[in-house]
Image (cartoon, rainbow, N blue to C red):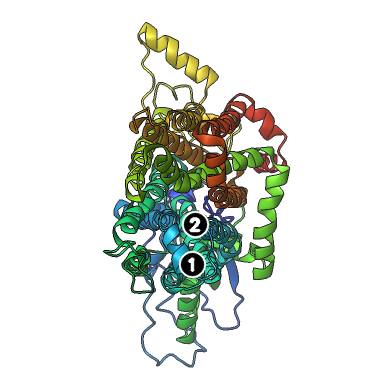
Amino acid sequence: MADPTPGHTAPDTAPPSWRSEDNRSPVLAPHPATVPDTTLPPPSKDTQLLDANTEITHLYLTFAILPPSANTTHQSSGSTTSQNGPPPPAPNLKPFTNPILWPTSVKITMLTLSCIATFLTAYTAGAYSPPQKLLVQDLAHAHSSTAILGGISTFCLGFALAPMFLAPFSEMNGRQPVFVAAGIMFVIFQVVCGVVETLEGMLIARFFLGVGASVFSTMVGGVIADIWPTAERNTPMALFSGAVLCGTGLGPLVSAYMTERWGTDANGNIEEGNGAKWKWIFWHQVILGGALMVALMVFFKESRGSVLLSRKAKALNRWYEQLEEKGFYGVWIDEEEGENGNADVDVDDEEKGVSPSGAKTLQRIRWKVKEDEERGSLTTMIGTSVYRPFHLLFTEPVVFFFSLWAAFAWGVLYLTFGSIPLVFRRQYGWNIEQGGRIFVAMIAGAILATAIGIWQEKMLHHPKWRAAAPAPVTSSSENSASDTEGPNALPYSSDEPKSPSSTTTKENAIWPFLRTNFPTNSPEARLYFTCLTATFLPVGLFIFGFTARPYYHWIAPTIGIGIATMGILSVYLAVFNYLADTYHRYASSALAAQSFCRNILGGVFPLVTAPLFTNLGEGRAGAILGGVAVGLTAVPWVLVWCGSWVRGRSRFALQLEKS
C-alpha cells in the first residue's frame, strides 16, 4: 500500500535557536549541516558540568531542527575516562537529509529507477498472454487457454493483496529494504515460471510473482510523494503512469514476436521442455529483473522521511552516548532557553530568525521521533492496513466510485491482452505476431496521454487563471491550510506574475470565467481536464468495437485502442491525485482500496474476453464496454460541480479539514 503523502511533521519541541532558517516550513527547510557543529561556544562564568546522574531531556526531532553544538571540550570532573583520548568524531548527517531537498539529479535517478521498475512490472503482466497456446501444450493438467489465463488472475490477486501486508514493513523499515526484498522475490518466481511443469505450479508462481511486482507499482507513488512537494508532483506522477501503460503495451508486443518466431520448430511442432527457445519469454525478463535489482541496491536511496529521522536520531543519540563514555556530557544551549525550555517563545522573533546570543549552558538531551511513538505493533499496523481500505471503500462514496471507475478502466486494459489478438485474427486473419504489433497503438496512446497530463498541470498554474488565488500561506507543515484555502488546494506560488491590468477582450471573457467557475484552489481542480480526457475511454471502445470489420481498414480499430489507452491513463492519474490530495494521511488506505478493486477486476476481465467477443461479436461487446465507460465518466463531473457538498458529508474529509 503506497504512502502517497509524507508523514506529518512532529511538534517542534526544540528551542528556537536550534531550528533552521526557514523555521515556519520544516518540509522546505534548508539543508542541514553534514555534521553537527562541534565549535566551542562561549560558556557562562558559572558553567556547571554535567555527569551521569544529570537528568536527560527528550526532544522531538524534525527536519527543521539543526542539532546544537555538542560538548567536546569540558569533561566531567568526576569522570574516570578522562585519559581515554579525544572525543569521538561527529556523525555524518548528510544521508539523513530531508528527501524534499535532495538534488535534482538524485530525484531524477530515483524517479527513473521507479519508472523502470513499474515498466517491468507492467511488461510482465502483458507478456504472459501471447504464449498461452504454447503453455497449454507444455504444462501438465492445462486443458484450455482459459485455464492458462488464470495465471493473469493469480498475478493480479497477489498484486492486490500484498501491499496491505507490506505497507507496515515499509513504514517501520523504510522503502528501500522492501523494494529490494520484493525485487528478489520477483526475479526468483520469474525463474520458477520458466521451469515449472504443471498448471498448478504456474498459477502459484504467478501469484508470488504478483506479490513481488506489486511493490514496484503501489509504492512508487509514496516515493514520489517523499521527494517532491505537492506543487511539483503531477509531472513525475504522469511519467510513472505513462511507464505503466507503455510496459503493458510492449510486453505483449515482444512476447507475441517470440511466440510466433520461436514457438515451433522447422516442422511446425511446438518445442517442449526448459530448453525450448520460446521459454526466452521468461528468461529475458529474469535478466531484466536481475539487472534492475543490482541498480536498486546500488542507486536506490531510502526516501521515507520518518525512517530517515529515526536513523538521524539514533546516530545523534549514539554519538552523545560515546561522548559521555569519554566524560563529555551535554550540548550547548543559550542560558535563557535552558531556563525557559520551549515555553514563551516570541513568535515575531522566531519568524525573524532572532534567537538569544548570550552565554551558553549545558543540557543533557536525547532525540526521539513522533512517528515512532505513534506507531503501533506490527500486528496492529497490519490489521489497520487491511481493515481501513475496506472501511473507506464502503463508507466513503468518493473512494467507492473512484475505485469502481479505476477498476473498470484497468479491467479494459487487461481485456486487451486477449481481445486484440482474438479480434484481429477473427476479422483480418492475422497471426499472433501481426496482432501483437497493434500494441504499438497502446504505447503511442500512453506517450500522448503522459504529455497531456503534464500540460494540463501547467495550465492549472497559468498566472491568469490563478490571478485571484489567495496569498501564500506559511505554516509548519506542507499539508497545512489557511482559513480561505482548503487543505487539498493546489499550492500557490507567490513568484507567479500577476495578471496584467489591461487585457484583450478575449482574455477578459475567458480567464475571469475560469477563475469564477473553476477555481484552482479547489481540490476538484485536479479533475477539470479529466472531465474531458476521460471521454477518450468510451470513445476508443466504441471505435474499436464498431470498426473491427474486414471492410474497414485495420488502422481504424487500432486508433480506437490508442484513444482508449489515453482515457485509461487519464483516469488512473486523476484517481491517484484526487484521493491523495483529499484524504492526506488516509490517502494510502484510500489508494489501497482502489488498487485492490483495480487489480481484482483486472484479473477477472481476461477470463471473460473470449466468451464476450465470441458470443456477442465485436460490435456488441464494444457497445457494452463503451456504455459502461460513458456512465462512469460522470464521476469527475459530479465531483467538479458537487465536490464541496460531497466532501462536507465525509467524516474523514471533515476531520482532515478541521485538523
- Name the one closer to the observer, 384 or 294: 294
Taking the image as drawn, is residue 233 in sight?
no
Mark 1 neighbour class, 10 Å CA radius: few under 14, some 14 to 19, many 20 or more? many
Which quarter of the figure is the C terminus placed in?
Answer: top right
Taking the image as drawn, is residue 516 in sight?
yes
C-beta proximity under 8 Å, tags 1 and 2: yes
Residue 515 in the image: above or below residue 311: above
The answer to which image quadrant residue 187 occupies is bottom left
- Name the one closer to the observer, 220 or 471: 220
In the picture of the structure, the residue carrying the numbered disc 1 is 178
Mark 2 neighbour class, 10 Å CA radius: few under 14, some 14 to 19, many 20 or more? many
Of mark 1 and mark 2, the one earlier in the sequence is: 1
Q: Residue at x 59, y 28 (%)?
A: 634
Residue projecting furthest to the top = 505
Amino acid identity at mark 1: Val
Amino acid identity at mark 2: Met
Which quarter of the figure is the N terminus placed in?
Answer: bottom right
Residue 187 in the image: above or below residue 323: above
Q: Residue at x 36, y 16 (%)?
A: 500
Q: Which element is circle 2 on?
A: loop
Q: Which element is circle 1 on?
A: helix
Residue 29 point in image, percent of width and height: 43, 51
- Name the one closer to the observer, 158 or 206: 206
Residue 605 point in image, percent of width and height: 56, 47
Residue projecting furthest to the left = 266
Residue 521 point in image, percent of width and height: 52, 30
Q: Is residue 598 left or right of residue 44?
A: right
In the picture of the structure, the residue carrying the numbered disc 2 is 219
As measured in the structure, the alpha-carbon distance from the residue carrying label 1 to the one carrying label 2 is: 9 Å
